[in-house]
Amino acid sequence: MRKYRAIAFAVLMGAALPPTHGLAQEADDDDDQPKLTRSSQNLPELILGTKDGTYDVNQKDFTLLAGQGYRWKITSGAAFEYKFHTDLFRDTWVNQIVIDDLEVHMNGAPAWLEFDRPGTIMVQFNTIRPGKYTWSVPDLVDKGMQGTITVK
C-alpha cells in the first residue's frame, strides 16, 4: 500500500510543478517578440484618403499575433466613397463594430466596410488563424489603396 501512495504522491507533485525546461527557455528567451495579452490591443489607425489626396494611405502593412484581441480604427479622411475589404475578417472572431459611439455586435464577419463620407469605424476582433491576408479598396487597387496583414 505504501508503494501506491508513493507513486500517487509522485504523480501529484509532477502535475503540480511546472516543467523545468520551459523555465529555462523563458530565461533564455531574448527574441523581443510581442507577447499575447488578455486585453485587446490597439492597432495603428488606417487612414484612407486625406484632404490633400483622395488615394493617400498612411500605412499599408500590419503585423498581428494569432490568438490576440485587437481594436482597429479605419478612417476615411476624404470626402470620397471607399469600400474597405479584407479577407482577414473571415479568419477572426469579430466582437463588435463601433460607428459614432454606436455598437454593432456580430455573429459573423462583415463583407466590407463602406464609407460614404469622412469618419471612423472601429472594429474589435480576435485573430484566430496565422497567415498572410490582404486589405484593399477594390475599385482603387490600381491607385495604391491596398496592403497586407500578416498574422504570426
Image: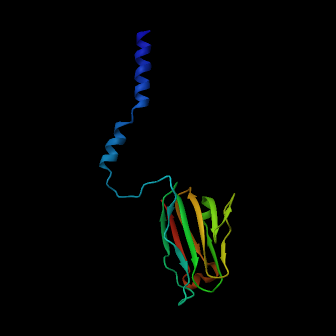
Name the colour scheme.
rainbow
The spot of residue 52 in percent (x, y) is 53, 90
Q: In this view, does 26 lie to the left or right of 52?
A: left
Locate residue 70, reporting x and y percent: 53, 61
Compared with 17, 56 (above or below) is below
On-image quarter of the N terminus: top left
Vertical order, 109 against 4 (above or below)? below
Residue at 61%, 67% in the rendered image: 87
Task: Tell me if residue 62 comes above or below residue 79 in the rendering.
Answer: above
Count how many numbered circles sit on residues in the image: 0
Q: Which residue is drawn at 30% across and 48% down?
A: 28
Which residue occupies the foreground of this view, 82 or 45? 45
In the rendering, at what x and y percent does residue 59 appear? Answer: 48, 76
Q: Residue at x 62, y 60 (%)?
A: 94
Q: Residue at coordinates 63% horizontally, 78% vertically from top-left? A: 138
Q: Quadrant of residue 92?
A: bottom right
> Which residue sits furthest bottom?
52
Give the x, y percent position of residue 6.
40, 16
